[in-house]
Amino acid sequence: MNKKTIIKRIQEVLNEYFPEPAIPLLHQDSYTLLIAVLLSGNSTDAQVNLVTPILFARANTPQLMTQLSVNEIENIIRRCGLGPQKAKAISELSSILLEKFEGKVPDTFEELESLPGVGHKTASVVMSQAFHHDAFPVDTHIHRCAKRWGLSNGKSVKQTEKDLKELFPRKTWNRIHLQMIYFARKFCPARKHDPASCPICSWIPHHR
């Protein structure tokens, strides 16, 4: 089975199981998505979704967020882990958005990644899901599946992103990255994974 056939079949499986994948993080706009994705680092989407309704009820704009102290933010987001660092980043980036970007989230990688606490993956999610620019955010789920399916060597997230962008059509990136996350959670987990019952690992040559 050649690589083109494998990619086509993977897309078919992902489309069958997750035809219209929704963003798993609760949010209202580009700003609240940015904060939610920042909080998801070293945490789970489920934990973040417990925290953000409380946080956003207090502050869902940069203006309102800067009115909260770093300690107040930390007390709300504590269960997401890395509370002190994340609270400081949220406070600082909110101030920067007001000072440099008229309170709006910028829509370029360079500007997003210049913000405190915003790495390439966070910027990629915002570019993809808030602004609909073609991007392929790679989290641990996607990184794991790409290696298992023989699509990347798994040496680094950066390499995995590069490999996946070369394999999948650009117009599908925004949807496929979400599909892969949902698929990984349901069928291709990190632990207790059964390749024989996985709708992709069961047939892909990498697992034979």
Image: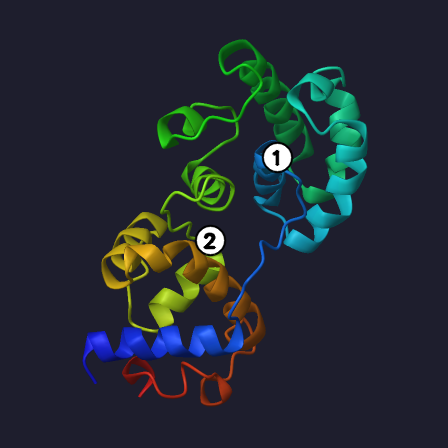
The residue labelled by disc 1 is 35
- Residue 40, horizontal then vertical, whole percent: 60, 45
Q: Is residue 129 above or below residue 3?
A: above
Name the residue type under label 1: Ile
Dot 2: what SS? loop
Image-quadrant location for residue 1: bottom left
User: Mark 1 vs mark 2: which is more N-terminal?
Assistant: 1
Q: Is residue 8 above or below residue 195?
A: above
Figure disc tally: 2
Viewer can see residue 190: no
Q: Nearer the viewer, residue 2 or 82?
A: 2
Quarter containing the C terminus = bottom left
Left or right of 189 on screen, residue 143:
left
- Residue 59, horizontal then vertical, whole percent: 75, 27
Q: Is residue 119 above or below residue 88?
A: below
Dot 1: what SS? helix
Question: Quick one: label 1, few (<14), some, or many (20+) residues within 10 Å?
Answer: many
